[in-house]
Amino acid sequence: MTTTIDIGTLIVRTPETCGNRPRIAGTRISVEQMAVLSKQGMTPTEIVREYGYINLAQVHAALAYYHANTEEIEGYLAAEKAEYERLEAEYIASQQK
């Protein structure tokens, strides 16, 4: 007999993990990570091979979440990019002293 999985259980948020950002249940792999890998051209099958401990349903759930909530995830990505750029500028300035 086949076990049915409620796809609503594949993506979760918890305050103590990944800053309450959406992630694949039972992992620390965020929807953001999956979106970035997909944007870099990786297919879901390649992502599963790369990580090894997640399955295709989980990757597709993360990508579906991203596509359904693009503005939210892109906001997280923009914030991370801004923080990276701030830290990079701070480091460069400290090296010039």
Image (cartoon, grey):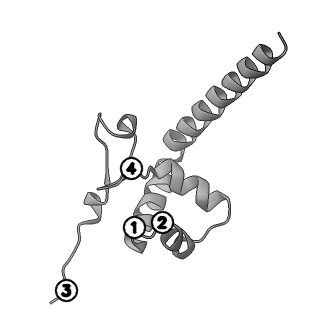
- Mark in front: 4 vs 3: 4
* Residue type, mark 3 in image: Thr
In what element is the residue under mark 2? Answer: helix
Residue indicated by mark 4: 28
Crowd rating for badge 2 (residues with CA inside 10 Å; few <14, some 14–19, many 20+)? few
In this rendering, is residue 69 above or below 1?
above
Q: Are the residues at dot 2 and dot 1 in contact (C-beta closer than 8 Å)?
A: yes
**Disc 3 designates what residue?**
2
Specify the quadrant that holds the N terminus. bottom left
Whether pointer 2 and pointer 4 mark residues with C-beta atoms closer than 8 Å, the reply is no
Residue at image position (60%, 53%) is 36
- Residue at figure coordinates x 51%, y 74% from the top left: 49
Farthest top residue in view: 97
What's the residue type where badge 1 is placed?
Ile
Distance between the Cα atoms at labels 1 and 4?
11 Å
- Image spot of residue 20 (x, y percent): 35, 36
Seen in the picture, residue 93 relative to 76 is either above or below; the reply is above
Helix, strand, or loop for circle 1? loop
- Per the image, label 4 sits on a secondary structure element best described as loop
Name the residue rendered at 25%, 59% in the picture. 9
Q: Residue tagged by mark 1?
A: 54
**Residue 91, position as x, y percentages in the image:** 73, 21
Q: Are marks 3 and 2 in contact (CB under 8 Å)?
A: no
Quadrant of the image containing the C terminus? top right
Residue highlighted by disc 2: 51
Residue closest to the eye, 45 or 89: 89
